[in-house]
Amino acid sequence: MAMAALRRESRRFATPLITPTPIYSLRSEEHAAIGVRYISTQIVRNRMKSVKNIQKITKAMKMVAASKLRAIQTKAENSRGLWQPFTALLGDTPSVDVKKNVIVTVSADKGLCGGINSTSVKVSKALYRLTSGPEKENKYVILGEKAKAQLVRDSKKDIVLSLTELQKNPLNYTQVSVLADEILKNVEFDALRIVYNKFQSVVSFVPTTATVLAPEIVERECESGGKLGELDSYEIEGGDTKSEILQNLSEFQFSCVLFNAVLENACSEQGARMSAMDSSSRNAGEMLDRLTLTYNRTRQASITTELTEIISGASALEG
Amino acid sequence: MSSTAAAAPFWRAAGMTYVSYSNLCANLVRNCLKEPHKSESLNREKVHFSLSKWANGKPEKPVLRSDTPDA
């Protein structure tokens, strides 16, 4: 017991004399660990650790997107049956020339999903330019945070309505129809042009526009005998007049088309996120490989240097 | 039939669109279901979004429209 205490004491006294700690401790405060005389691999090691963590995160995000995609894909595919009868009846006429165009841009609330948000913004802007002219009023209605951020920059004068936080609950028809109702109430339009990304497969999305006409325009087109000339061949049952029927129909058409558009876009978002996360984890892997190579090379070089020093020192003593 | 034929339907006179009218009807039908299906279908159809109108290039204060109580 006494011996041990003594030994500890003596060590404490002896240390400053034997080891040259003062020099190293001074240096260690500034740069690196004690006894470092070569290039530090600390930075590379930290970098490797962070890249590894990022890779873990992107892999997890990919998994999440894949599982969400599966649920939403069946919904989107089922919802296609909603707008097809309308297109058969009222037609989809993107070329119609009207005064008040309202462009409904559908986008996501979250980023990290490739280019789908900027694609729909780009298509909306092109559509805006295409339909604009003298005596025309074009307006934007924006769904989702990301398109809002992009359109605010150069066309914030034309935004009339923006809707966000759509995907807090799983998407359903009631949600979208209430949303469509808000748009119908708050915006005056002759034609609504919905811009969204149609889902084709996990890697391919087609920017699409769907056009919904106001009832008066439908009637006008119908009378002029253009593309909607066949509408007169339908018989109307009950006591409602044709304009009432058309108004109901076009409102319901809008909510159905919007429902499909929102679902397709959500589906594309998850697909795009999946492939984006896949490629980013692959990139992280490649980066990690390169960093490992650099790290090992440096380590080996420093070992070689040390060995050379020792050997040359020893041979100098011998010689 | 003949009573509604002359004027616009009563719900449109009340300022509703066809969409909100049909939603109301759909909700009534859902409430007519028996129990396990009723709560299931009512829980499925939840509405949540925030809406903000824009005036002169500036967004007004967003209005939150939500069925979930805590949001």
Image (spheres, rainbow, N blue to C red):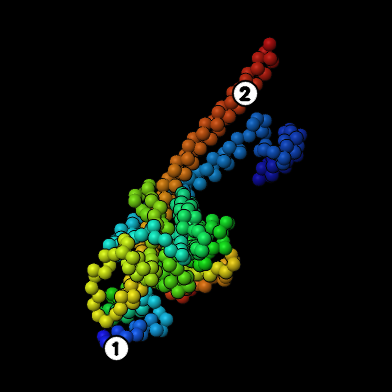
The N terminus of chain A lies in quadrant:
top right
**Residue B17 visible within the image:** yes
Q: Is residue A300 left or right of residue A104?
A: right
Q: Which amino acid does label 1 sit on?
A: Ser
Question: B59 and A129: which one is in front?
Answer: A129
Q: Do labels 1 and 2 share a chain?
A: no
Direction bottom: furthest residue:
B3
Q: Quadrant of residue A228?
A: bottom left
Q: Residue at x 34, y 83 (%)?
A: B9
Q: Residue at x 41, y 47 (%)?
A: A275
The C terminus of chain A lies in quadrant:
top right
Give above or below for A305 relative to A253: above
**Residue A81 visible within the image:** no
Question: B36 and B33: which one is in front?
Answer: B33
Q: Mark 2 points at which residue?
A: A305
Q: Where is residue A26 in the image (x, y as percent from the top left)?
A: 75, 38
Q: Which amino acid does label 2 sit on?
A: Thr
Give above or below for B19 relative to A307: below
Chain label for disc 2: A
Q: Position of residue A146 (x, y in %)?
A: 51, 57
Residue B3 numbered mark, or none = 1
Q: How crowded is mark 2: few (under 14 residues within 10 Å), some or many (20 or more)?
A: few
Q: Position of residue A128 (x, y in %)?
A: 48, 57
